[in-house]
Amino acid sequence: MNTATVRFRSAALERHAEFTAILPDLAAAPGPYPVLYQLHGYSDDHPFWMLSANLVRHVARWPLIVILPDGATSFWINRSPRERYEDLIVEDLMPHVSRMFHVRPGPSAVGGQSMGGFGSLHLALKYPDRFASVWAHSSAIFTFDQLLQKLDLAPEQARDADLYELAARIPADQRPAIAFDCGRDDFLIEHNRRFHAYLEEKKIPHIYHEHPGQHSWEYWEAHIPTALARHAEVLGLKEIPRQ
């Protein structure tokens, strides 16, 4: 595996932005490759999935490009004219990655933890044509009222960020493969249980797991291999043979 840190101009942010890329070994698995966008949490930045969960080692099994963008503390949504992190991903970063690397045409995968779990679910549910698979860990899954209060969003912004509303309105034949998990001792466990119950009520197919654990990198590193295997299954990837 190879890694690179890239700085590029973002029209959405009106400034330069950075991301880290984890790239497959060309000799072991010639491209083109699908892409996984893996989003960080509120107190982290773009290299954290690589540094704190050893993502390079875990993803080495799969012919997959992993992109680790930097989302500051945005919750990966458009919060103001100069804080448009949703547009950063969809309008700026995805085309840039396709130009820069040997990317396979077609939809990508997206994942993340905590704030990044919310962001990954939001992107996948809002843009099911762009994301075929989502796996979110220990996610902050806010209700409409919580979006108004905790994120201080205007009503139209909260409606656009409401995961419940987004999940309900996707036509059945356009839904991404939805999966999420949470530790039983995580302070966000009720967020995840509530969303799971809602998807069950609406008969929206999904995978949901609870495991022992807290809101920690120890938990996320333990469960990222399962998420990667699910993304690979959805994207039709075969495991790279061990050398």
Image (cartoon, rainbow, N blue to C red):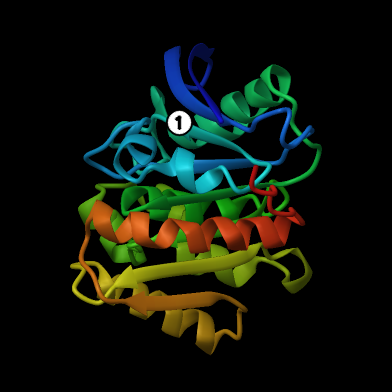
In the picture, measured across the screen, residue 93 lies left or right of residue 137, that is: right
* Observer-nearest of 142 and 39: 39
Residue that label 1 marks: 69
Q: Is residue 203 left or right of residue 184?
A: right
Q: Indicate the position of residue 104 as horizontal and vertical percent values.
A: 78, 36
Which residue in the rendered view is the most extreme toward the front? 243
In the image, 119 versus 143, the foreground residue is 119
Q: Residues within 10 Å of mark 1 (few under 14, many from 20)?
A: many
Q: Is residue 100 visible?
A: yes
Q: Is residue 28 above or below residue 195?
A: above
Q: Quadrant of the C terminus?
A: top right
Residue drawn where x is 18% and y is 73% of the image: 185
Q: Quick one: 7 or 53, which is closer to the camera? A: 53
Determine whether 155 is above or below 73 in the image: below
Q: Residue 198 appears at what percent x and percent y?
A: 46, 81
Q: Position of residue 177 (x, y in %)?
A: 64, 65
Q: Tag 1: residue type?
A: Pro
**Position above or below: 97 against 115:** above
Which structural element holds mark 1? Answer: strand
Residue depicted at x 79% and y 33%: 32
Res. 175 image quadrant: bottom right
Query: As drawn, which residue projects farthest toward the bottom?
Result: 201
Q: Quadrant of residue 172?
A: bottom right
- Looking at the picture, tell me which residue is in the foreground, 97 or 95: 97
Pinpoint residue 205: horizontal percent, then vertical percent.
62, 78
Up-down relation of residue 131 to residue 196 (above or below): above
145 displayed left or right of 227: left
Q: Quadrant of the N terminus?
A: top right
